Amino acid sequence: MKVVILCGGKGTRLREETEYRPKPMVPIGDRPILWHIMKTYAAQGHKEFILCLGYKGEMIKDFFRNYLWMTSDVKLRLGRSPQLKFHNHHDEEDWTVTLADTGQETMTAARIKRIEPYLGTDTDFLLTYGDGLSNIDINASIQEHRRANKICTLAAVHPAGRFGSLIIENDGAIHTFNEKPQVEQTYVNGGYMVCNRKIFSYLTADPNVMLERGPIEKLVADGQLHSYQHEGFWQPMDTYQETQYLNKIWAEGNAPWKIW
């Protein structure tokens, strides 16, 4: 099943990084977050990718065009008959990546609409954002999507709290302080969607329409939006602090999304 990843936003809340590169190219360790997301899908058998590019999309094109150069040890022979040898093999050699320019200012609904031709005759496809990491069971979400027989199934996840949690007694004394807050009990849209191609009838070429507004609201009204409840790890990268957190747990070898 093909994987569509939205990679075109400007990431204005992460201006420390995105002033210089697109948000999906912000690194976690020595690879961009986009690579980590793709590895999660590939580890579960989904290796055909369609990337919806926009802001600074040329940097994403450069990364994949020069993928061997950027990830391998290289031997060069200089001179009038130059030779080039890559010493490494990598697990991504069976990936296919379609790099689609979907516009600099385009909102999410039209970005998805513009890649419809690249899906071929596929009935269903996978869809997510280029800035969130999870250990979600992709294939279980596909099974739930098919069981429900709806147009779109999204991953319902618990957002992590952004502040330390306190337990305060009546007298004001604090007896418990959790630096890493408990996850909230509500659910939010975590991306990692499974879509039937009927979703394209809900989308528009209007570059000002967001998927999360009109199209999703219409799917809800028509009873065509379903959920796959994911109780495991999910973490967006919306702020510099979240970037630091993701890099910290990756460096420590405690990254829950590393399932490969």
Image (tube, rainbow, N blue to C red):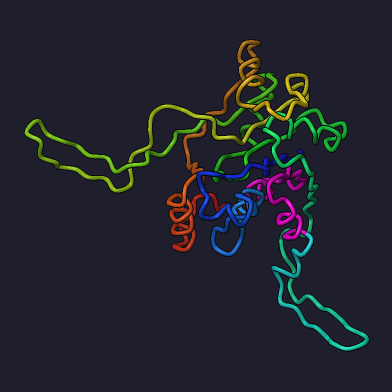
Instruction: Residue lying at the far top in this picture: please name it.
Output: 222
Q: Tell me which residue sits at (78%, 27%) in the image.
A: 205
Residue depicted at x 71% and y 54%: 60
Question: How far across and down, in percent of the image, does residue 184 sit?
Answer: 38, 32
Above or below 45: residue 79: below
Q: How many marks?
A: 0
235 relative to 192 in the view: left or right: left
The answer to which of 237 and 147 lies nearer the viewer is 237
Which part of the image, by quadrant, shows the C terminus? bottom right
Examine the image and state in which quarter residue 137 appears.
Answer: top right
Span colored in magenta: 40-64
Q: Nearer the viewer, residue 157 or 203?
A: 203
Residue 31 percent across, percent down from the top left? 61, 61
Determine whether, in the image, residue 10 is placed left or right of residue 174.
Answer: right
Q: Is residue 170 left or right of residue 200?
A: left
Magenta stretch containing residue 60, yes or no? yes
Quadrant, the N terminus: top right
Q: Residue at x 59, y 53 (%)?
A: 33
Asked if 242 appears above or below 155 in the picture, the reply is below
Image side of residue 134 versus residue 176, left or right: right
Please say whether residue 131 is one of the residues in the magenta stretch: no
**Residue 70 falls in image quadrant:** bottom right
